[in-house]
C-alpha cells in the first residue's frame, strides 16, 4: 500500500511540474491542481496509513488514527479550491484583455518575431 501511495504522489508531482512548465495558462492551472493533490496526499500519508481504525481520539480506544493530518488535508482542499477558482478568474480576465492564453501575454502571432 505504501508503494502505491508513494508512486501516486510521485506521478502527480511529475505531472504537475511538467504542466507548470508549459507556456499556456490552462495547463499551468491544472499543474497547480496536481501539485496541490500531491501535497495533500503526502500530508495524509505522513499521518501513517492505517485501515479499520477510527480517526477519533478517545480514552478507551487502544488504537486510533491520528486525526490531525486529516484535518490539515481537509483545510488544504478547501483552500486549494478557492485558489483554483481565483486563478481561473484571473486567467479568464487576462485572456479577455490580452486575447492570448500565453503565460507572458504574447499572442501566437508574435512568438516567432523574437519579442
Image: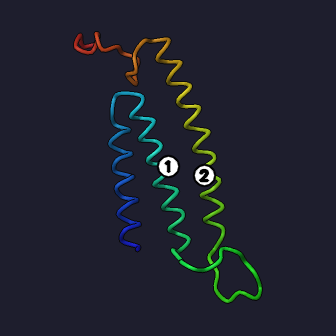
Relative height, residue 101 to residue 36 (above, below): above
Q: Residues within 10 Å of mark 1 (few under 14, many from 20)?
A: many
Are the residues tagged 2 and 1 within 8 Å (C-beta)?
A: yes
Question: x, y percentage for residue 95?
Answer: 46, 17
State the residue in front, 110 or 52.
52
Residue 85 lies, in percent from the top left, at 58, 34
Say if 56 sits above or below 94 in the image.
below
- Give the residue drawn at x 34%, y 47%: 15
State the residue lying farthest toward the left: 112
Quarter of the rendering occupied by the C terminus: top left
Q: Looking at the image, which residue is at 38% across and 52% down?
A: 13
* Mark 2 vs 1, N-terminal side: 1
Q: Residue at 34% across / 55% down in the picture?
A: 11
The disc label shown at residue 76, or none: 2
Identify which residue, 88 or 18, lies in the foreground: 88
The residue tagged with tag 2: helix, strand or loop? helix
Q: CA distance from mark 2 to mark 1?
A: 8 Å
How crowded pointer 2 is (Cα within 10 Å; few <14, some 14-19, many 20+) is rated as some
Q: Quadrant of residue 2?
A: bottom left
**Which x, y percent locates residue 68?**
65, 67
Please give left or right for residue 47 compared with residue 35 in the image: right
Secondary structure category for the residue under label 1: helix
Label for residue 51? none
Q: Residue furthest front?
A: 52
Q: For the N terminus, give its image quadrant.
A: bottom left
Q: Which residue is mark 1?
A: 36
Q: Nearer the viewer, residue 63 or 109?
A: 63
Q: Residue at x 66, y 74 (%)?
A: 55
In the rendered image, the vertical position of residue 107 relative to residue 64, given as above or below: above
Amino acid at each position: 500500500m505504501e508503494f502505491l501511495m508513494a508512486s501516486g504522489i510521485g506521478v502527480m508531482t511529475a505531472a504537475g511540474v511538467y504542466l507548470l512548465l508549459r507556456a499556456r495558462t490552462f495547463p499551468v492551472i491544472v499543474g497547480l491542481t496536481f501539485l496541490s493533490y500531491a501535497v495533500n496526499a503526502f500530508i495524509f500519508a505522513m499521518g501513517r496509513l492505517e485501515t479499520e481504525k477510527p480517526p477519533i481520539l478517545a480514552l478507551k480506544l487502544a488504537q486510533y488514527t491520528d486525526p490531525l493530518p486529516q484535518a490539515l488535508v481537509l483545510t488544504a482542499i478547501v483552500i486549494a479550491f478557492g485558489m483554483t477558482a481565483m486563478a481561473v478568474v484571473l486567467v479568464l480576465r487576462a485572456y479577455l484583455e490580452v486575447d492570448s492564453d500565453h503565460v507572458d501575454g504574447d499572442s501566437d502571432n508574435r512568438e516567432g518575431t523574437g519579442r
